[in-house]
């Protein structure tokens, strides 16, 4: 049986995990996948971890990693990847997914099936390939996303349209190649591009799959201007290193 671990970082997502986790399990298990949803929670004050624990007590396929403080999405994924590879070694794929409902479980199934059929090491849920797009989105947020992806292409040379997407399927064997380098990554918004850069350098086959990006179901976005500034700084430094041949 094909297997996947879906890593979902959370901070104050109690309103969303109660419906999202069962939806992911229903869709993937219904298609014949063995699946575990791994929630990495940064001690959310709204009780997100308690919601996950209650669900895990009555339904298999749910794993919780609760961290002692708010350390950011990048380190949450790193800790989640390590736990997935060590505890759930049967999984063929490790997936990244947001907790806010913007990533449809049905699209995740399509991404997994694409990886299976094409042999891709990485499949990105992409807003910028035919069939993808924003269901809703402020002009500001769309412009920031477009600009960030342009910077990613220029700075890294990776020819994908949505390098900043946090919706991904990664083959476990590909992740194993770079797991020891993950401590080099920054946290926050820039993490996704850094991770993709490492996978690209490791020779991984990367594909994109159409994503209809949905509006957040509940709660508030955690992307601030500080994250955008750090992202632009990393891209500039990476571009300069490429130009200088380092």
Image (cartoon, helix red, strand yellow):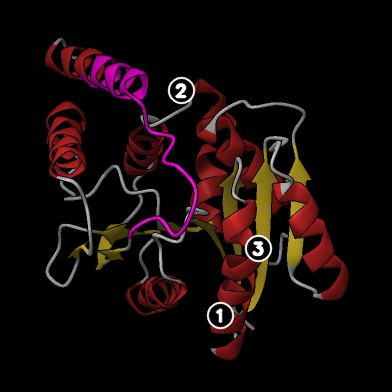
Question: 62 and 87: which one is in front?
Answer: 62
In the drawing, what numbered circle is on residue 37?
3
Give coordinates of residue 145: x percent, y percent: 20, 40
CA–CA distance in space, label 3 to label 1: 11 Å
Q: Earlier in the sequence, mark 1 or mark 2?
A: 1
Is residue 225 rendered magenta in the image?
yes
Residue at screen point 36% across, 51% down: 204
Q: Categorize mark 2 by other alpha carbons within 10 Å: few (<14), some (14-19), many (20+).
A: some
Instruction: Pick the residue in front: 116 or 186.
Output: 186
Q: Residue at x 78, y 67 (%)?
A: 55
As helix, strand or loop, the secondary structure at mark 2 comes to loop
Mark number, residue 186 = 2
Quarter of the figure with residue 7: bottom right
Q: How crowded is mark 1: few (under 14 residues within 10 Å), some or many (20 or more)?
A: many
> Would residue 66 be found to the left or right of residue 224 on screen?
right
Quadrant where the C terminus is found in the figure? top left
Residue 49 versus residue 237 in the image, above or below: below
Left or right side of 12 for 203: left
Real-space Cα distance between discs 1 and 2? 31 Å
Where's residue 193, x and y in %? 33, 36
Asked if residue 87 can be seen in this view, the reply is no
Quarter of the image where the N terminus is located: bottom right
- In front: 81, or 55? 55
Percent x, y of residue 149: 18, 39
Q: What span is in magenta?
A: 215-235
Residue that mark 1 sits on:
28
Q: Which of marks 3 and 1 is nearer the N terminus?
A: 1
Q: Is residue 101 visible?
A: yes
């Amino acid at each position: 049986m094909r297997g996947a671990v879906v890593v979902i970082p959370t901070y104050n997502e109690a309103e969303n995990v109660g419906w999202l986790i069962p939806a992911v399990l229903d869709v993937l298990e219904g298609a014949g996948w063995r699946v575990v949803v791994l929630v990495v929670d940064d001690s959310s004050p709204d009780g997100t971890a308690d919601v996950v624990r209650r669900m895990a007590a009555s339904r298999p396929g749910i794993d919780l990693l609760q961290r002692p403080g708010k350390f950011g999405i990048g380190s949450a994924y790193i800790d989640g990847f390590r736990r997935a590879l060590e505890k759930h070694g049967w999984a063929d794929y490790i997936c990244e997914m947001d907790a806010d409902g913007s990533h449809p479980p049905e699209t995740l199934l399509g991404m997994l099936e694409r990886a299976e059929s094409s042999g891709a090491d990485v499949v990105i849920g992409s807003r910028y390939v035919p069939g993808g797009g924003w269901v809703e989105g402020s002009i500001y947020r769309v412009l920031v996303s477009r600009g960030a992806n342009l910077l990613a292409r220029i700075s890294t040379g990776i020819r994908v349209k949505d390098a900043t997407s946090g919706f991904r399927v990664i083959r476990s064997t590909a992740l194993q190649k770079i797991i020891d380098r993950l401590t080099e990554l920054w946290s926050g918004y820039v993490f996704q591009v850094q991770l993709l850069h490492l996978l690209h350098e490791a020779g991984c086959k990367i594909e994109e799959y159409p994503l209809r990006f949905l509006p957040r179901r509940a709660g508030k976005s955690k992307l601030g201007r500080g994250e955008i500034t750090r992202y632009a700084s990393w891209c500039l430094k990476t571009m300069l290193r490429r130009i200088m041949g380092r």
